[in-house]
Image (tube, grey):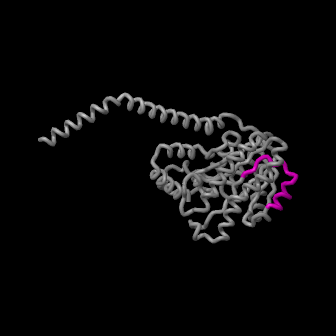
Amino acid sequence: MAAVDSFHLLYRQVAWSCQSHMEFLAVVGALYTAGKGLKLICQSYNLIRLHITPLLFSRTNLGRQYGAWAVVTGATSGIAQAYAEELARCGMNVVLVDNNREKLQKMSDSITATHGVNTSFIEVDFCKGHEAYRPIKDALRHVEVGILVNCVGNFLEYPQSVIECPEEQLWKIIHVSVSAATIMAKIVVPGMAQRRRGAIVNVSFRSCCKPNFPMTMYTPCQLYMDGFTKELQSELSSKGIFVQSLTPLCVAKERTLHYRPSFRFPFLVPSPEVYARHAVQMLGVSHRTTGYWAHSMQLAAACWLPDFICQLMGRFLHTASE
């Protein structure tokens, strides 16, 4: 009985002490709720401004806005291939850069026949480092490059830590995922600055946002690309050059999708063609974007969900994209 009385006495004392702070706690709660509400409104506004508004207006002629030619690295597969084709559909002449001559020739002929624009290609293996850029410099010497899309990447055949990965493979990752975008920008920026117009799009996947063991080398390279783009934008904005960090989430690897029957939301993992169509709409609109409305919605939702739920969703979408 004494224990019960003691508990009630303690409860009354705690309740009385908290009551004096009730108004303060109510104000804190109201401010927190207002902050979260304002954040939600801002996210909704950005989604509409970036992904819906551009669809309501006719696209500015890219060639007139930036220059006659676009250069796309890694152009024979995935997002880069679809992006090059979308630029051609918008009337841009395209220079394709990759390491497979047969695929380059086939893609060049296909773009010319389909879209009626001029194309050329440069066969280059970025893994070779410094010597890879001489033919690019020679080929682009007299080309009015208006848009540069850095989308070349070097993926590990399977996840490896820095200890397991051979030194030769590490150098290939650095040459392709770090050096390529940097030197390609160095090559085309002087001409853009002289004409005071141009655009550079650096593609880095959203793995750069969180640690991703055991992809110890690949993830920091993506982080470099994202950071390099921010600094490049600060440097070149006064020269009339638009710089964009394009950070997609899951994009299907196959050009023609065959989704698993259990995957009910295919719009979350678009085909490269669908993704490129939306991403090109973001050119000149946003300096840092996922490029696709559903990806932006996923990122917005991730701000409100615990990390473990985001990881589960990421694994699910990654499996569905294969």
Residue at 77%, 64% in the rendered image: 101
Residue at 65%, 54% in the rendered image: 224
Q: Quadrant of residue 19?
A: top left
Position of 166 compared to 68: left or right? left
157 within the magenta span: no
Q: Is residue 286 above or below residue 182?
A: above
Residue at 55%, 53% in the rendered image: 210
Position of 45 compared to 186: left or right? left
Residue at 66%, 37% in the rendered image: 54
Position of 302 compared to 171: left or right? left
Q: Nearer the viewer, residue 28 or 108?
A: 28
Residue, far left? 1
Position of 286 compared to 101: left or right? left
Quadrant holding the N terminus: top left
Q: Is residue 116 visible?
A: no
Q: Position of residue 48 (x, y in %)?
A: 59, 36
Magenta stretch, residue numbers: 133-149
Q: Is residue 198 visible?
A: yes
Quadrant holding the C terminus: bottom right
Q: Nearer the viewer, residue 179 or 61?
A: 179
Q: Nearer the viewer, residue 315 or 88?
A: 315
145 within the magenta span: yes
Q: Position of residue 68 (x, y in %)?
A: 82, 46
Q: Position of residue 146 (x, y in %)?
A: 79, 46
Q: Position of residue 289 (x, y in %)?
A: 63, 44
How many marks can you see? 0
